[in-house]
Image (cartoon, helix red, strand yellow):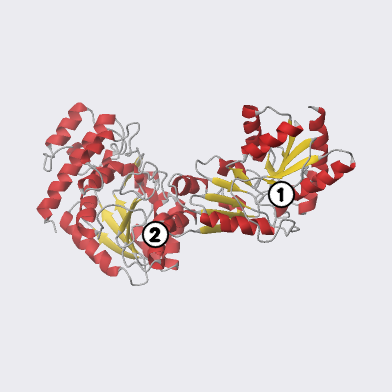
Amino acid sequence: MMGIAAGLTIGGKIPFTGTFANFSTGRVYDQIRQSIAYSDKNVKICASHAGLTLGEDGATHQILEDIGLMKMLPGMTVINPCDYNQTKAATIAIAEHVGPVYLRFGRPSVPIFTPDNQKFEIGKAIHFTEGSDVTIVATGHLVREALEASKALYEKGITAEVINIHTIKPLDAKAIIDSVSKTKCIVTAEEHNHLGGLGESVARVLSQHQPTPQEFVATNDTFGESGTPAQLMEKYGLNSASIVKACERVIKRK
Amino acid sequence: MANTQQLENITTQVRRDILRMVHKVNSGHPGGSLGCAEFFVTLYNEIMDRKEGFDMDGIGEDLFFLSNGHISPVYYSVLARVGYFPVEELNTFRLINSGLQGHPTTHEGLPGIRIASGSLGQGMSVALGAAQAKKLNGCKHLIYSLHGDGELQEGQNWEAIMYAAGKKVDNIISTIDLNGQQIDGSTDTVLPMGDIKLKFEAFGWTVIDIEEGNNIEAILKGMAKAKAETGKGKPVCVLLNTVMGNGVDFMMHTHAWHGKAPNDEQLAIGLAQNPETLGDY
């Protein structure tokens, strides 16, 4: 599929591929690397069923390494939207962008909380809440959890600045640096291994420009397993409660 | 139209180019390159309908994809000799900052190249995508591709071979370089593939044999036959029987020169067997 997609661009087509995230990346990494990324082909790799929320199928199908695999490829844009409206807007935006893109999204129906017909700007972070005590940078399904966490933190007298990073590469470094300049600490949240994910990209930017205490809400170098999405997100610490705890930990490290 | 003697002369010069390129950097793949010299020369000079210049989309012309990218020396030589870039650039093969990378790539913007190849087994899929793009664009031109026989051991080929017939991609001519050799020995020693012709036919392809794949007349005849089979609802495969290392006696009939450069003395012998015709770069 990846090879044929690469070939279709020769003749001016803009192919969108579609399959599970695991089979969109790990299974075809060499094909993406040589025939798409290295060959500068305008292919849009659209990957569903990413992460633990795939649920009952288990670890063979739950990839938690795909963001890392894709962001390492030179020239690849990596996007992980958070709900239907953002995914739709991103799909239109990547069609207009020239170059290979990895668009990652999940299997379950999740609540829609971003605006209909929103403008999607690749590489531009979205501020959901203003806060001064902690920055929460979240992507994909963890954005909604981050908003829930910010409400819980508010009850405890902590104001959190929730930033939605839908584009992991290129990363909106300025938005992150500006926010931590104010809050002095950060929590990153993603449905992905802490190795190779959004958190690592944020850590790289901060270590270089503004060293800042950071906590990671992500899986801890592990495979997933069968279960309902909610059970898995709880077991692997990828929900609002985990984000609240991570915020409390990181605030103490300031 | 060039006559056969003219094509022979170009081929002789291409052999010199291959030997000199590989010798200079003491690396590269002369064996498969030499085995396919007649095919490349005939393809680019006589068989393909090509536009002047180069653009990536290649609408309104036939396109070629090299899947076994390690035979880049013959590819680069022929691309230069038909005018895609100056022949002097052959001097930069495998050197730093060159467009002539060890394996072909679009990344450095070398005219004539439309896809990177080197990691084997990917070229047929790409060629099929390009063939389908031609159909979508209403372009009547053809897609040509070349694959090593050893390369057929890569499983992706068989997905592509199945796809091509299943989707009735009948505007592609995929040629298999049947030289019976691969990096570690004969294909039969490393992994016997059985009857390749029967396999392609079983997958729904039309198969044309070119028994003498180093004979320009035979290539012209066989490829014309293959072209006549396009547009009939089935993909077309050409089985090109070649001799690895053809034209340099000590490199022939062995896998030893798959990826090894000649030394000074061997180069001199090889060049003496292939006197200059068009002028060295």
Position of the N terminus of chain B, as image quadrant, is bottom left
On screen, B273 above or below A12? above
User: Can I make out residue A107 in this image?
Assistant: yes
Can you tell which quarter of the image residue A206 is in? Answer: top right
Task: Name the residue nearer the viewer: B7 or B270.
Answer: B7
Residue B76: x, y in percent? 27, 43
Amino acid under disc 1? Leu
10 Å crowding of disc 1: few (<14), some (14-19), many (20+) = many
Mark 2 or mark 1: name the one nearer the start of the chain: 2
Q: Secondary structure at mark 1?
A: helix
Q: Chain of mark 1?
A: A
Query: In which image quadrant can residue A201 be found?
Result: top right
Labels 2 and 1 within one chain: yes
- Which residue corresponds to mark 1? A52
Answer left or right for A220 relative to A25. Answer: right
Does the rendering let one see residue B244?
Answer: no
Residue B264: which disc? Answer: none
In terms of secondary structure, where does tag 2 sit? loop
> Label 2, on which residue?
A11
Q: Nearer the viewer, residue A62 or A10?
A: A10
Task: Identify the residue shown where x is 28% and y is 34%.
Answer: B92
The residue shown at (62%, 41%) is A172
Crowd rating for badge 2 (residues with CA inside 10 Å; few <14, some 14–19, many 20+): many
Residue B131 placement: quadrant:
bottom left
Label 2 marks which chain's residue?
A: A
Between B83 and B157, which is closer to the camera in this rendering?
Answer: B83
Residue B57's spot in the image, x, y percent? 37, 57
* Residue B146 falls left or right of residue A167: left
| Structural distance between the alpha carbons of marks 2 and 1 | 38 Å
> Residue type at mark 2?
Gly
